[in-house]
Image (cartoon, grey):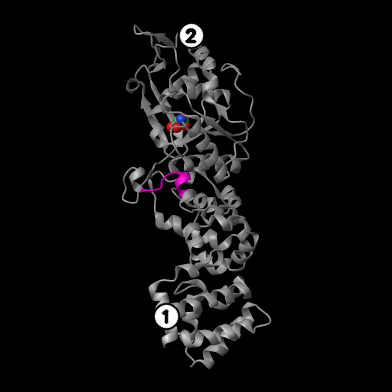
Amino acid sequence: MSVSAPAQTQGIVVRFAPSPTGKMHIGSARTALFNWLYAKHTGGQFLLRIEDTDSERSTPENTQYIFEAMNWLGLESDREPLIQSTQLENHKQAAQKLIASGAAFVDEEGVTRFKVPEGAVHWTDLVQGDITIESKQIEPFALLRSDGTPTYHLGVVCDDITQGVTHIIRGDDHINNTPKQILLYRALGAKVPEFGHIPLILSESGEKLSKRHGAISVQELRDAGYLPQGLFNFLLRLGWGHADQEIFTREDAIAAFDIHAVSKGASRFDTSKLNWFNAQYLKSLPFTEVKPHLLAFLPDAAQTHPADFKKLEFMWADFTTRAQTLPEIADAARYLLADVTESYTEEHTAILLEAHHLLHDVYDTFSAVTEWNAEILHQVIANLVQHHGGSFKTVGRPLRVAITAQLGGPDMSRIMAALGQNECLRRLKVALHHVHQNGGHHH
Ligand code: GLU
């Protein structure tokens, strides 16, 4: 496809054009999200372009990071992604065309430069409003380097023309590039697209967001245990709002998204807000939707054990009411998936020792239960409590320690129902053995 024959497109076409120079920064992810939402809201197309012409910093691995992050966030390109390095001939042809028409010239060092016409460049930015730049502020910028390779300005404009892009939504660090690019569109005889420049995301304390602020790439946030749904909603609300609504499904977000409502001021990355969104999705999504994301955080053996998933699913609401991230759930659910009787602490041992006289009765009582479910177990525990003096703690605490190696957590009757009778009896037996080994028989 040549630059002089722009793609015939109907309606709105937007693109996300990252340079594959590292993991995907959340600022880039938000730019991608706003483009995607704008396309979906208007019934247009969302395109991906990989700007890989900086051969020193662009690597195939970094390109994979982009595909991976886009895929994880569910921001699919409506066409095959365009790889910028395949378009170099096209860029060079455009430069020749500009030289031929007198819009560009080759300087003494052999650099092809754009001849900036007099006057001013004006555009109405979709986010920032009216912007006017005087031509005398624009230098005769390079189009081809002396070695003949195209510059960013030439490449980006040619590719946007080739892809039929109608709206360019990108970070406001590109505002200074826009007047140059508008002049290039005109000189190439192409329709100038609309532009919208979205403000940067700053750190909580208002600095430029960088590695020292912790997890700031999509991959790092995924690995820290955030759900794509949580990150999607968090990014959406960074600099964009709709009345006082916080939670948006993908469908809600598509219906409500309005590029004109994006704030002109920088927004701040607020980890507690991200945690809050993630917690909302952990609570509201069905287990089956969270499960694929949870797998990586579970102990290896549990990952392939269908029985373990049944236990987790049974107790899902018990865990999600208390957790903000996936590793918190994996950690809290450890006693469902692993034999925690090997990890009794000194404090646990002391609690078991103090209760050793009733643990035999607890064991015998649970052995005699014939129907094993949470309601019945609740009643069995209540009876045991009554029998052993009436305080719940007297029975509940050693029982919890014996079975979960924890001091707190969800309702014991639910935990025991999830684990099943055999496993509960086995753990009680281990706890009794542990007590005896630690001197319980002397009491
Ligand atoms: N490749 C450029 C970047 O990653 C974006 C170009 C553009 O959006 O116009 O900053």
Pick the residue in front: 101 or 410. 410
Which quadrant of the figure shows ligand 1? top left
Asked whether residue 248 is in view, the answer is no
Question: Residue 172's quadrant in the figure?
Answer: top left
Q: Specify which label sits upstream in the sequence, 2 or 1.
A: 2
> What amino acid is found at the position of numbered circle 2 in the picture?
Ser
| Residue 185 percent location from the top left of the image | 49, 21
Q: Where is 344 relative to 231, above or below? A: below
| Residue 440 percent location from the top left of the image | 43, 83
Task: Assess whether mark 1 and mark 2 are in contact (beta carbons under 8 angstroms).
Answer: no
| Residue 365 percent location from the top left of the image | 59, 86
Residue 101 image label? 2
Crowd rating for badge 1 (residues with CA inside 10 Å; few <14, some 14–19, many 20+): some
Q: Which residues are magenta?
A: 214-221
Q: Report the residue at 32% width, 23% height from top.
A: 137
Q: Where is 230 relative to 259, above or below? A: below
